[in-house]
Amino acid sequence: MALLVRVLRNQTSISQWVPVCSQLVSVSPSQRQWNSTSQKIKIAALRMYTSCVEKTDFEEFFLRCQMPDTFNSWFLITLLHVWMCLVRMKQEGRTGKYMCRIIVHFMWEDVEQRGRVMGVNSYILKKNMALMTNNFYAAILGYDEGILSDDHGLAAALWRTFFNQKCEDPRQLELLVEYVRKQMQYLDSMNGEDLLLTGEVRWRPLVEKNPQSILKPHAPTYNDEGL
């Protein structure tokens, strides 16, 4: 296992945030009384973000896309998967958009925590966080335009953001375009109510053993409270 990925997985724990889910988003005084539904959405959002960082094969991305084993590479891969989740959940109306806000909040909490684990100076970390925030929203805009375009448009968006304009092998771009397309198709096939209740996402492999197969997602399991 790659050194950085091993360090980040072993020394960070996303599950510790579950008890403080209700404190993650600033709300107006009239919204302070969270009902059970909103609390479930926050926990589902945590699970969905967790799937982006714990169910993604970072090492395969490093290998196939010839990416260095760095914190920035980890962030670019995570950003791509978070974006795909946001695209899917925005289709679920107001509740889905609320869940998107929570997912993004968890992402920044996680990024900051991982930076500290790596021993990044607090001043440098704050400066880098500001830069990453700008890059995040620029990436989201570019990816949104790319996914609505043809494969050439999506490839251009991935080349600018994911590869930082440094990809010289068209096969890597082709692989990533195919991955995004099939992953979005897979996410779209998942039941929206189940995603809002559980947040459980399983990612398709970067390289399919059977390229012709389109796997039907397994129905998630949850109790009568949706947890």
Image: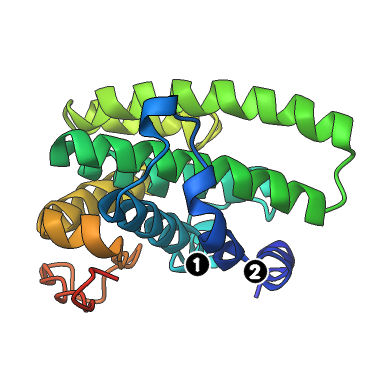
Which labelled disc corresponds to residue 54? 1
Q: Position of residue 160 (x, y in %)?
A: 46, 26
Helix or strand or loop: what does disc 2 sit on? helix
- Res 169 → quadrant: top left
Q: What's the residue at 63%, 66% (across, down)? A: 13
Residue type for callout 2: Arg
Q: Tell me if residue 201 can be seen.
A: no
Q: Nearer the viewer, residue 39 or 146?
A: 39
Q: Is residue 205 above or below residue 22?
A: below
Q: Position of residue 175 (x, y in %)?
A: 33, 51
Q: What's the residue at 66%, 51% (across, down)? A: 68
168 to the left or right of 2 = left
- Marks 1 and 2 close (CB-CB < 8 Å): yes
Q: What's the residue at 62%, 29% (across, down)? A: 132
16 to the left or right of 34 = right
10 Å neighbourhood of mark 1: few (<14), some, or many (≥20)? some
